[in-house]
Structures are given as structure tokens and as C-alpha cells.
Image (cartoon, grey):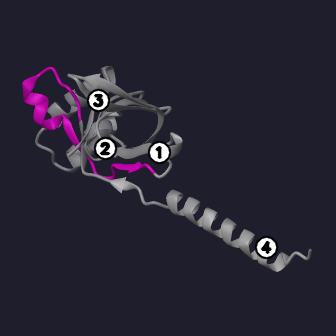
Amino acid sequence: MKFDFSKVSMVLILAVFFWSSSSSAQEGLPRLSFPAKYKMPVKQAHLADVSEFELVDYSINVSREPYGQADIAYTLPAKLLGYEKSLTLYMRDKRSEMVNGVSETVREFSSREATAVCRGAWNKMSCEVKFWLKPDLVALEEILRATKDPRIADRLEVAREFGNDPIGLTVIE
């Protein structure tokens, strides 16, 4: 019996090509971008309107979610910290929990700067976030004065509260 190796090698080449194409197509998926805010709980009602911050570059990479991998990335604004801080948090756990008789997806993310427990579908997800970051109050005041912000004292108070208890919510809107 005579084997035609040219046909076998062509089949192998095509198989490798299609396998690598589908794999890289998965990994090459663009990040999902959503409008989102960071909402910080504050004790004084008059600070509520200066304790929400746009996360202009909020994005999620779900291309490897079938393999238990995903990440969320965003930048905390200078009007909170006195400097911009880009973060990427990586998924560590995904599970379903029953809430009022309804199954809900819960994902846990972490990085060196933060941890997050997120609930809901990707496009409606909200996350309780704890940060290990400190604001630079001197730099923040300089930024606020340079932009002639009328609520300098209130924004500095929010930043102080963040420095003492750096928790809040990221919410896709």
C-alpha cells in the first residue's frame, strides 16, 4: 500500500490553520466598552453630586471567559485622586447565586490595587470595589483650582473620605 504524504500533510496544514484561526479569532475579539460610573458612598447628602465619577474607558475582555478568564479595565479620574490611575482587574471566580429565587451571576476580580465583587450580565454589571489607593490631596487641589471648580472644598472632602474608606460601586449605565 502506498501513502500519498502530500495529501496527508495538506490536511494537517489545513487543520492547524483552522484551529489557530479560530483560536486567534477568539483572542482577537475587541474589548467590550460600556459607559460606566464610579459611585462613592458619602455620609453627607450635600456631597452626593460630587461623589460620582465617569469612567470614560471602562472595558471588559471576555474573549477567554469560556476558559475562566476575563478582565475589566478602567481609569479612575484625577478629580477623585489628584492623578489618573489605570486599573485592570482579573477574574478569579465565577459562580451563580440565588437571590430572591432568581439565579444571578457573580464574578470576583482582583489586582494589586483593588478587589471587586460583580453581579449581573456583562452589559449591566455592577461591582462593589475596594481599592488600595490613596489620593494626592495637594495635586487634587491644584487640579481643581486650575479648572476653577466651584466645589473645591466638597471635592477635597470626598477625596479624604475615599482615602479613609476607599470603597464604592462601578456601575454600567
Q: Specify the segment rendered in magenta.
A: 39-62
- Residue 145 is one of the magenta-drawn residues: no
Give left or right: position of 87 versus 49: right
Q: Earlier in the sequence, mark 3 or mark 4?
A: 4
Q: Which residue is mark 3?
A: 103
Q: Are marks 4 and 1 in contact (CB under 8 Å)?
A: no
Task: Tell me the number on the disc at residue 65.
Answer: 1
Query: What count of labels does the image hold?
Result: 4
User: Element type at marker 4?
Assistant: helix
Does any portion of residue 84 appear in the rendered image? no
In front here: 25 or 77?
25
In front here: 77 or 122?
122
Q: Quadrant of the N terminus?
A: bottom right
Q: Which residue is mark 2?
A: 78
Q: Which residue is mark 4?
A: 9
Q: Amino acid at mark 2?
A: Ala
Q: Earlier in the sequence, mark 2 or mark 4?
A: 4
